[in-house]
Amino acid sequence: MIFDVPTLERVSVDELEALGIGAGILGTGGGGHPRVGKLRIQTLLEDEAYPDSVEVIQPNDLESGATVASVGGMGAPTIGVEKLPNGGEELRALEAIEQFSGREVEALIPGEIGGVNSIVPLCVAAMTDLPVLDADGMGRAFPELQMDTFFIYGHPVNYAAISDEHGNVISYQDIDTAKRLEKFARSAAVDMGGRAGYAFPLMDGDFVTKYSIQRTLSLINTLGQNVLEAQSSGRDPVEVICNVVGGQHLFTGKIVDVLRRNEAGFARGTVELAGLDDDATLTIEFQNEFLVARKTDDEVLVSVPDLICLVDKNTGKPITTDALRYGQRVTVLGVPAPELLTTGAALDVVGPEPFGYNIEYSPLSKK
Amino acid sequence: MIFDVPTLERVSVDELEALGIGAGILGTGGGGHPRVGKLRIQTLLEDEAYPDSVEVIQPNDLESGATVASVGGMGAPTIGVEKLPNGGEELRALEAIEQFSGREVEALIPGEIGGVNSIVPLCVAAMTDLPVLDADGMGRAFPELQMDTFFIYGHPVNYAAISDEHGNVISYQDIDTAKRLEKFARSAAVDMGGRAGYAFPLMDGDFVTKYSIQRTLSLINTLGQNVLEAQSSGRDPVEVICNVVGGQHLFTGKIVDVLRRNEAGFARGTVELAGLDDDATLTIEFQNEFLVARKTDDEVLVSVPDLICLVDKNTGKPITTDALRYGQRVTVLGVPAPELLTTGAALDVVGPEPFGYNIEYSPLSKK
């Protein structure tokens, strides 16, 4: 799946505001708050010791055997906004898998385009002078490591590492399943205080070209730019977002209740919305990201892998699960998942059932 | 501290029974049941693909820069007797730290001489043709990784790895404290089902010579041999044990209650003994190993780091915490801890206080 948007070729300070907004919208409430990442990359690009922009390349630009790794942060977003990284976590993790494997990484790819993890690879790229791919492994954000297309489509868990702000590094080698890596690394991230930087796996160019979701850095850039333009021109930002990502306006209302708990390394909970002019309600459950939205009569309106995006009704700015609060006026959008997330193999990992719901996935695109 | 016992130069099948008994006694209830380790090493030594004995060397035999690592198993002993290893766990962990560091290990050392972890290095030695040092890091068994003399006396946590029976390997690099390694690796061992094989840290010959507890493989061999001889000659095995290790006979009684739970990767609990001929009672608390023994009036009779050893009253065979059951007739011995465990630095890590007791350590040797 390749989105039809103008190609982003470099990221400089000028693109950061748009990228943050676009990443926040596709973060479906999670993926970590883009603001923290935006400040990190801005600091680097403005620092004379680092380049003032990062190169973005297409998967096709890679040689077939080129080595690619994804880097990012893992943990509960509610913790990520308070326990700030020291900025070296992901680089240390990357260096660990290079050291362990004896291979040198030639390009970085975001594991997920939603939330801060679209920005973190740009930071590591600025520190290492590596290019970042205009692609990712989720086309959105998901809470668990096995949920990216690399693992869904069978890439071995050959090398992985996580690191904390103290410089501690934990590496994983030849893990039998991606779900087991998730289990191991989640416990470790909890032990590290609820947030850690990661790097994994080591893939080659051919695999990434075939199984990544492409042009997604370009997509969040265009998405953010259009929202900013709508804000300044007085157009309806919600309509603009729907146009760019093929989304549907599902509900507009006021947040009347938020239940939130940190559990086993995740921010889990429920948010309830009431219609502004009628008795309709919408209930959305989340595990870092929004998973299922139900109407008053319990009918499922949208579920994973489709995207449930909450934005400010007036500005189109994304609202993350950690920022949900009583009284906010929000618009809920549904966005069809990229095709690589709706195959049988993908639904076994990112459909409603693996998240614990006894719901059959009914694609939003067919509604 | 060097024990005055005949030197063990090689371990063949002939030594295994004695080693198992000696290791069980110094295991102070934990360290993993020696029986599982004995079967593992016996299988290897009887296999034509491996040597029929393992070389035991003294720390002084090492060149000062020779690379040494400890290998063993971690987890709850109650799980270790049921979830059997596949035998490759420790070797995979060892290979991981060699690969990560680029260094080649030249000798193995038991992390603890008590329980199965005195035997596991012999298994890895048989598989790799490396020698095993006649020394260890505890002179007994303790439940947590930071409790060996290597870490107590300041060795950096440079490299460590653990592995499970599926071949999964988790490596730790430059961990800031040994207690943090314990935290990380304990969670991982729990995720691995409650038992994993480990290898750590990479030390050099000089450090090991200075900070290991020496001649302890020779000690458990002599201890076991003497118990076996006492059994066949009709001498009192308890008296024999006390002679070899400088121990004291504290109590003989019947087990009248056992409380045991698996908690956070450990077997924790309490065992209560009643005197055979009088109203005296003895209560012993344990976390994998026996920690504190109290008399009827709550007076502390022995506490860590001194050893509390339970043996069968008639045969002198050690009784591990996982095997405690109502009605057993047992003798309780107290054994003074090696000097390296009773310094200020050591008591900060293995004294009663770090185990959560508000007790001042009163050395058994002075009672």
Image: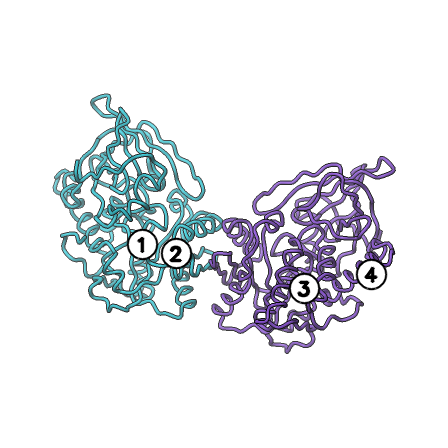
Chain colours: A cyan, B purple
Residue A107 picture location, percent across and down:
29, 64
> Which image quarter is the N terminus of chain B in?
bottom right
What amino acid is at disc 3? Answer: Asp
Q: Which residue is mark 1?
A: A111
Occupied quadrant, residue A65: bottom left
Q: CA distance from mark 3 to mark 1?
A: 44 Å
Disc 3: which residue:
B136
Residue B338: % across, % down = 75, 60
Query: What type is the residue that disc 1 sits on?
Result: Gly
Front position in the image: A122 or B122: B122
Q: Do callouts 2 and 4 point to residues on the same chain?
A: no
- Residue located beneath label 4 in the image: B229
Q: Reading the chain from its start, which is encountered first: label 1 or label 2?
A: 1
Label 3 sits on a secondary structure element that is strand
Name the chain letter of the residue that bears numbered label 3: B
Q: Nearer the viewer, residue B361 or A365?
A: A365
> Callout 3: 10 Å neighbours few (<14), some, many (20+)?
many
Query: Please, which chain is the residue tagged with disc 4 on?
Result: B
